[in-house]
């Protein structure tokens, strides 16, 4: 008989909630230590304090051999740096800028992070329609001062960083070419059903640390989405349907109290689910909620569970600390049973 190895921290370690919160990235560190193939969404993009060049200069295309001439440095705004060995990159970060400067047409990578920019005026990128990356995080941008058609004209844009600003609404419309969208650490309260319409190439969506109360069915059309981070919001429900390509779902620190039956079956590639620090109870979970054959990691810690929910035999790591579980027999798929003795794991442990 082949047993699924379950890492039940509630029974193995006396880990307090304070310890857990002090290191929000313990999940990623553990997976790295296990030499997992798990993709860390926050690397190389760090949290505060910001690296002046978080994406690394070497990620921009180097000047190719045999080019007839170097770019004219005179078209570079005086507020910025345009390295001749990276002719398509413009660095305007950490300069106390209050406005967006002119962007030369040759630019593909522009860095405006960590300034005092409060608006993105209409037409500011019209001269540089070949942009691939735009970094505007760590500014003071508000939704009312973002031009309606700012980004839709950028048909090649792949990465947009608008996190750590003062946005209250989802920006849009956005170009179909977009692959990564960073909107975390803003004040967005909802995601309308059409807010992400047409983004069929989007692979990573970061919406953590906002004030989102509802996302509805806005995620359904994101057929290429691999990573979705909705942690640290005010959600009471999970999204209405998950993208079929999704592999990583982060919804910790919300108010979710129920998950529908067979909910994760709609995402057959889903590997990692994090639902810690919510309001889940056994009454809010159907018998097959987490019995998904693709799941490898499931974090249900710091909820209000009194029983261990049934899980798939393929599950490798299950986190249950901080619940109200005293001891239970775990029903496993395939007719196998695993008896697990758990002690109640309170903060005073």
Image (tube, grey):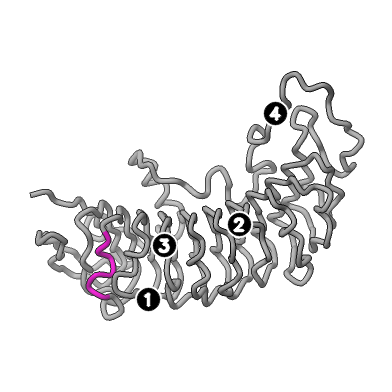
Q: Nearer the viewer, mark 4 or mark 1?
A: 4
What range is drawn magenta here? 286-292
Could you tell me residue 62's position as x and y percent? Answer: 70, 28
Name the residue that disc number 4 marks: 62
Q: As rendered, which of 145 and 232 lies closer to the eye?
A: 145
Could you tell me residue 137's position as x and y percent? Answer: 68, 55
Q: Nearer the viewer, mark 2 or mark 1?
A: 2
Name the residue that disc number 1 marks: 279
Residue lying farthest to the bottom in this orientation: 283
Q: Nearer the viewer, mark 3 or mark 4?
A: 4
Query: Counting residues from the N terminus, which is met first, the one under dot 1 or under dot 3?
Result: 3
Name the residue that disc number 3 marks: 18
Query: Counting residues from the N terminus, which is met first, the one under dot 3 or under dot 2?
Result: 3
Q: Nearer the viewer, mark 1 or mark 3?
A: 1
Name the residue that disc number 2 marks: 182
Local SS, label 4 = loop
Q: Nearer the viewer, mark 3 or mark 2?
A: 2
Q: Residue at x 44, y 78 (%)?
A: 236
Local SS, label 3 = helix
Q: Residue at x 27, y 61 (%)?
A: 292
Query: Counting residues from the N terminus, which is met first, the one under dot 2 or under dot 4?
Result: 4
Q: Residue at x 58, y 46 (%)?
A: 45
Q: As rendered, which of 22 and 340 lies closer to the eye?
A: 340
């Amino acid at each position: 008989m082949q047993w699924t190895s379950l890492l039940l921290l509630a029974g193995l370690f006396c880990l307090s909630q304070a310890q857990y919160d002090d290191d929000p990235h313990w999940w990623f560190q553990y997976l790295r230590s296990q030499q997992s193939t798990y993709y860390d969404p926050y690397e190389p993009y760090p949290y505060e304090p910001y690296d002046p060049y978080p994406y690394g200069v070497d990620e921009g295309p180097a000047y190719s051999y045999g080019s007839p001439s170097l770019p004219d440095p005179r078209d570079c705004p005086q507020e910025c740096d345009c390295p001749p060995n990276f002719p398509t990159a413009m660095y305007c970060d950490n300069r106390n800028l209050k406005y967006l400067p002119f962007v030369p047409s040759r630019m593909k990578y522009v860095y405006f992070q960590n300034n005092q920019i409060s608006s993105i005026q209409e037409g500011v990128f019209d001269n540089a329609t070949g942009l691939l990356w735009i970094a505007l995080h760590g500014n003071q941008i508000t939704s009312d001062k973002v031009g309606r058609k700012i980004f839709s004209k950028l048909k090649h844009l792949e990465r947009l960083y608008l996190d750590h600003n003062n946005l209250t609404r989802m920006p849009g419309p956005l170009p179909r070419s977009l692959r990564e969208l960073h909107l975390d650490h803003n004040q967005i309260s909802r995601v309308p059903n059409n807010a992400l319409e047409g983004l069929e190439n989007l692979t990573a969506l970061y919406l953590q640390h906002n004030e989102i109360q509802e996302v509805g069915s806005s995620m359904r059309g994101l057929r290429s989405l691999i990573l979705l981070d909705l942690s640290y919001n005010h959600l009471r429900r999970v999204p209405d349907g998950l993208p079929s390509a999704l592999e990583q779902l982060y919804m910790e620190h919300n108010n979710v109290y129920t998950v529908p039956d067979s909910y994760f079956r709609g995402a057959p590639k889903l590997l990692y689910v994090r639902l810690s620090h919510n309001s889940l109870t056994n009454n809010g979970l159907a018998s097959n909620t987490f019995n998904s054959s693709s799941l490898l990691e499931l974090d249900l810690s710091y909820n209000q569970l009194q029983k261990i929910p049934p899980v798939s035999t393929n599950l490798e790591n299950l986190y249950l600390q901080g619940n109200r579980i005293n001891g239970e027999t775990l029903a496993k798929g395939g007719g196998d049973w695993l008896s697990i003795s758990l002690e109640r794991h309170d903060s005073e442990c």
